[in-house]
Amino acid sequence: MVNMFAKKKKLIDVLKEARNKKSAVGQFNFSTLEQLKGISMAAKEFNVPVICGTSPGEVNYFGMEEAVSLVRAIEKKEKVSIYLNYDHGKELNILKKAIDVGYDMVHFDGSDVSLEENTKIAKELVFYAKKRKTLVEGEISKILGKSTISDEEIEEVTLTSIEKVVKFVKESCVNCIALDVGSFHGVHKNSPIIHSERVTELIKNVSSFVVLHGGSGIDDEMIKELIKKGVTKININTEIRFEWRSALYNTLHNNPNEIVPYKILPSAVEAVCKKVKEKINLFNYEKNSF
């Protein structure tokens, strides 16, 4: 699919520039139009590119083709660069379909299979994606959690050996690698214990872009430290969901008789936009730097 935004750079070039400038590109997941609008408004205000992610659950609700069409329509109208990533895909045929319908990037989460099988599938996916100029993100260790995470789940957080990560990246040739440094999906009453030294060690040994999953709920100073070390892409989802839900709840609570969607939903758009702008600032974006 041809990008409709003529000045749009290749995603790999955006990631390279971010890494060189010690910045990070934000991936912000969405499953509603309000969330997508809020993300695009923030990106436009700061004049920076963003990655929009859709997990399997989000795709099942929103639609794969619909996500591509709406993203392309919004970036054309608003003159903003939005890159679409299929997040945490576990099935090769689904990821290939995402590539075919126009996703800019796909994330193969092979944490449920052996390292050998993970490498084999990732390698095949990279070969398929390269022909279509699509990037591939890999993952070998399960990053736990959903929108919230329990004390028991936190105790299960483990760290895969650097040697295994390096071996996987070298053999699969993935463009990006999801890093297990103690983060988890969702939020908890306590901030995750991040092993930042693993970032330093991994970056010394791989050429792929390093990705932080579970960016929600991590202390701002730790985020800054990880970016300085070389983390190039940071995923945010749960905080967006909380802002979306809170805005809708407050609007409906304060206007119990209102039934007009276009009078109710703008508050959710604004709340998401505000949160994404906070993250863009945190990730050290510079206006017009891209």
Image: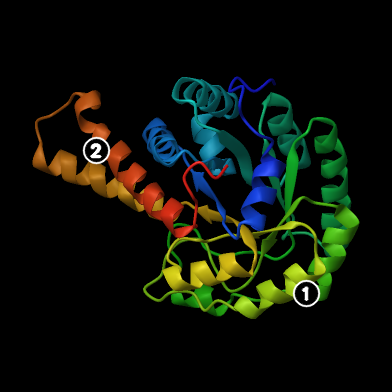
Q: Name the residue under label 2.
A: 267
Q: Residue 188 lies in what quarter of the image?
A: bottom left
Instruction: Report x, y in % for residue 279.
Output: 43, 54
Which residue is at a point 78% across and 71% down the rendered structure image? Answer: 204
Instruction: Report x, y in % for residue 229.
Output: 63, 70
Could you tell me which secondary element the residue under label 2 belongs to?
A: helix
Q: Can residue 219 be seen in this view?
A: no
- Return the residue nearer the eye: 219 or 283: 283
Quarter of the image that includes the N terminus: top right
- Give amino acid for label 2: Ser
Instruction: Report x, y in % for residue 42.
Output: 40, 40
Instruction: Establish if 38 lies above or below 280.
Output: above
Could you tell me which secondary element the residue under label 1 belongs to?
A: helix
Q: Is residue 87 visible?
A: yes
Which residue is at a point 54% across and 54% down the rendered structure image? Answer: 235
Instruction: Establish if 224 lies above or below 235.
Output: below
- Return the residue nearer the eye: 95 or 198: 198
Q: Name the residue under label 1.
A: 162
